[in-house]
Amino acid sequence: MTCSTTATPKGQDILRFLDSIISKIIPRVNEVPSASWFQSGTRRLLSILPFYFPGFKLSRHEGSRLKAFFNQLMREGRLTRAPIHETQWIGAVLLQRIMVALFRRALEEGTTNWDRVLQKVLSLLLLGALACRLGDITKHNKDTHDLPFLCYKDITIKLVGGTRIEHLVALIVIRNEKAKK
């Protein structure tokens, strides 16, 4: 069946188009397309159609059919809610690359103050070692509570089982952790 490119699309045309798209898409990660990708694409399509076709508007019935079509795709397994990307913590190798890049840039382009470079590197190192967010150990200008930052008294370092550097053990208090402020 051929459709005119100048005629205002109907709800059935939109459903037919979305059904054909689902069968043609080959995702990079999952076996089937993501439900969130499909929903956001459908929303964008429906929001832009009135600009190209001033008479376009879905009826309530057509909107219900679109929702039912989405639910049917989910039941048939043609869409997935599985995450596309895995959350990954920053690794020591990536952290090292960032620090080396900061030092290299300062050496090659120059710096007005090496204290700033060292501060950036050490703050990144502290964030990586504590596996925390920047706001957990630093102060925001709107923080009003007592000690809204990491203090010297928050860090306790001990030698445990020897006198070498690998025997250092630190206990660090993070009082500004998200949802615990």
Image: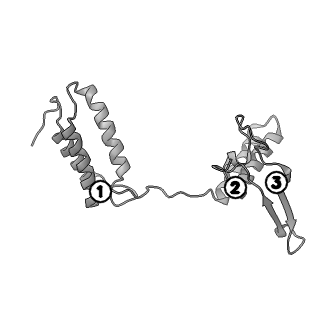
Q: Position of residue 119 (x, y in %)?
A: 79, 44
Q: List the single residue furthest toward the right.
A: 163
**Amino acid type at mark 3:** Asp
The location of residue 158, given as percent across then percent down, is 86, 65
Instruction: Calculate the distance from the C-alpha at mark 2 to the C-alpha at mark 1.
Output: 39 Å
Q: Quadrant of residue 169?
A: bottom right
CA neighbours of label 3 inside 10 A, class few (<14), some (14 to 19), many (20+): few
Q: Residue furthest top?
A: 54
Q: Nearer the viewer, mark 2 or mark 1?
A: 1
Q: Residue at x 71, y 52 (%)?
A: 127
Q: Position of residue 139 (x, y in %)?
A: 74, 41
Report which residue position mark 1 lands on: 74
The residues bearing labels 3 and 1 have C-alpha atoms spaced at a distance of 50 Å
In the image, residue 67 sits, relative to residue 144, either above or below, namely below
Residue 11 or 3: which is nearer the viewer?
11
Q: Which residue is mark 2?
A: 128
Residue drawn at x 17%, y 32% as measured from the top left: 5
Q: Is residue 113 left or right of residue 20?
A: right
Could you tell me the amino acid type at mark 1? Met
Q: Nearer the viewer, residue 128 or 149?
A: 149
Mark nearer the N terminus (2 vs 1) = 1
The quarter of the rendered structure image containing the N terminus is top left
- Residue 61 drawn above or below residue 55: below
Q: Amino acid at mark 2?
A: Gly
- Residue 70 location, x and y as percent? 27, 50
